[in-house]
Amino acid sequence: MRFLLAATLLLASPAIAEDDPVSEPQDLTFERVFASPSLNGPSPRQAKLSPDGRYLTLLRNRDDDRERYDLWAYDRESGAWSMLVDSEKLSSGRELSEDEKMQRERARIGSLKGIVSYQWNSDGSGLLVPLDGDLYLAKLDGTVQRLTDTEESELNPSLSKTGKFVSFVRDRQLWVGETGGEAAPVTPKEGDTIRWGEAEFVAQEEMARLAGYWWSPDDTRIVVQRTDESPVGIVTRASIGATGTKVFDQRYPVAGSDNAIVELFVIAPDGGNKVKVDLGSETDIYVARVDWAPDGSAIYVQRQNREQTVLDVLRVDPATGASSVAFSERAAVEDYWINLSDDYRWLKDGSLIWWSERDGFAHLYRKDGDDWRQLTDGEWVVTKLIGVDEETGTVFFTGTMDGVLEQHIYSLDLTKPDEITRLTEPGFTYSASMDDKGQTLLITRSSDDSPPQSYLADSDGKLLTWIEENALDADHPYAPFLASHRPTTYGTVEAEDGTALYWEMVTPELEPGKRYPVFYSHYGGPGPQTVANGWNGALRQAIVDRGYIWFALDNRGSANRGVAFEQSIYRAMGGVEVRDQKAGADYLKTLDFVDPDKIALYGWSYGGYMTLKQMQADPGLYAAGITGAPVTKWELYDTHYTERFMGDPRTMPEAYEKASAIPDATKMTDPLLLIHGMADDNVVFENSSELISVLQEANRPFEMMLYPGYTHSVGGEMISPHMWNTIFRFLEENGVTPPE
């Protein structure tokens, strides 16, 4: 590992180069793909700068356990790294509470071990570190002070803005105490259906809001959420494990049912002086975001209607709870929803930088009083607001201005926003965050041929120091497999309406006259963009090493192509995206190196749903299908996600019936492998059990592999290769094999 300190040093060239040390090609096994150390190289998480900017901290995974993370610090003055908290030495081994396990599932970190989050205190003298359900205060000299020691988990821990208080949720109450002192509950205990200080299920799972309370800038007040779950229906979830079954009565708001009732209160740190926030007379709403004004003079609450077509931004008086609508965001066009975002910033002068799709593409705007000014425009999208340097009036963001396949980092001057500057070099896809002052960039970049590299950069994008250079040199874990690494190619096919659909492909080394099977991977649902110039790990290379072509396509409905591209699935899931993926299959069949009779589908979650719908729509088009944790009936999925795209099943039953994968299940004639975790609390197992029953009752053959104790993410050092070996045994048994 090298740390380059020259401010003007050029970044490294793409990692796979002619002089890279390679040996004889080695085929990747699935066992090696999921073993430690990770073939991606080091994968730091949550890189943060200390308040004074001297230290960079991050969570780093271990070479001998890729899922375990420790807390490290880098002194930018001395250039030295040190481990602040060794998660193994400090670990109590205590099992996490069910609530914390579920929160980790919502945050998509359920498989991680050790330290998964931390927070700097305001004076930069230490960091709050949760571990095994308890809290610790880590100092820069390596000492660690234990703050809590209980059987219960301390959920949602936080330091107040000045660092005077530590707060957390325990046993459905918000607790507060002075840092280093004893904490006490500051909200009442109200029974099993009332939670204080926690985001409700759909906020965590679908709105990317994990917080349930918010400290004021001066620590004198807290906005705290009160959630009444009593209206929410109970789903009895059987968590079927290897040696027994646990049954949970889970409050799960399926589409068309009642949501939890969410209220907000403003309280003092001791729980006194409680004021209720006026959220309006309609209680069937979503509280999407809560923010304090920089000077603490107001609270801004984003209120979304049940249909998710209107987003009101309320300005709340902290002293009285009285509210007024500061402005409203409405769906860009009829028959469209509002995508929530964290890409906004209230500035000290009272103005607001705001992300919106109101002109048909995602762009940045500035609201100053009643005046709106569009800062970016064009047929491309802003994907993230990274930061704002208020001293210079500079806004930093990522976007697709230079093409949809690569996200780059850009800056603009608020006084002349038409002059946008790209800060990053082509050939990579970038993501970034910044310090609160908007002066230092923490950048991660990758490409199809370069695993993630992370570095600090100044406001011009010039490298200051590597965080993880992660060069593919002789010492890199992936080095033994470089000789067989295959490049990615890109292209487009036309949808039925002429829209360009991007695809990517990785092929084995092709031999003249031979035709190869295709592993057609897809997601297909709203949101994720699959096709992009970014590192995808060793898994696809392992598949290609087996003699398969790896192929993916982004259908209409996916993100980062504008409103018209995304809204095609509105109230019509399982329709346009299925036809778009068929266009990809039809294109593959025109290629002289593709075996047209050996195109196999693979998808997980929405992708699993897509596998079923594609096989039902076009029997015989695909050689086989693998469906992992599929949604089979949208009435079984939650309100916020499902109704956003499908409407309310109580008023749109025909749309749900058409979208279901159950009525036409028996139309599938091609080989099918069904995979599901038997403790899945996201796409509950009932989705698969009904499909299983329908196929069995119709005497239709299929195969399945179920994983006791595993949730929506089926994986692990041994489980992952077991699953992938199962998939390819299934393909081989059904003749989807490479040429001799």
Image (cartoon, rainbow, N blue to C red):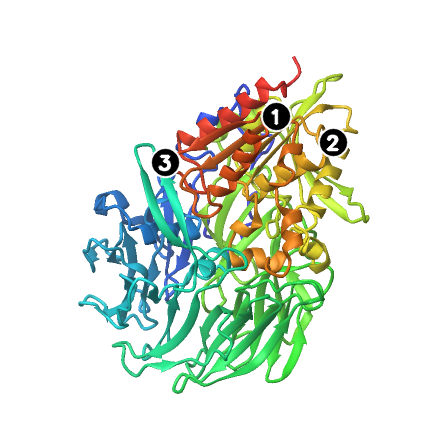
Looking at the figure, which quarter contains the C terminus?
A: top right
- Of badges 3 and 1, nearer the viewer stands 1
Element carrying mark 3: loop
What residue do we see at 18% from left, 56% from top? 149
In the image, residue 590 above or below residue 685: above
Mark 2 neighbour density, 10 Å: few (under 14) some (14–19) many (20 or more)? some
Name the amino acid, label 2.
Leu
Is 397 situated left or right of 33 in this image? right
Name the amino acid, label 3.
Asp
* Residue 202 visible here: yes
Which label is found at residue 671? 1
Give the number of callouts. Answer: 3
Q: CA distance from mark 2 to mark 3?
A: 40 Å
- Of badges 2 and 3, nearer the viewer stands 2
Element carrying mark 1: loop
Q: Which residue corresponds to mark 2?
A: 588
Q: Which residue corresponds to mark 3?
A: 63
> Which sits earlier in the primary sequence, circle 3 or circle 1?
3
Name the amino acid, label 1.
Pro
Is 392 situated left or right of 155 in this image? right
> Which sits earlier in the primary sequence, circle 2 or circle 3?
3
What residue do we see at 40% from left, 41% from top? 679
Q: Nearer the viewer, residue 85 or 330?
A: 330
Q: Position of residue 413 (x, y in %)?
A: 62, 71
Element carrying mark 2: helix
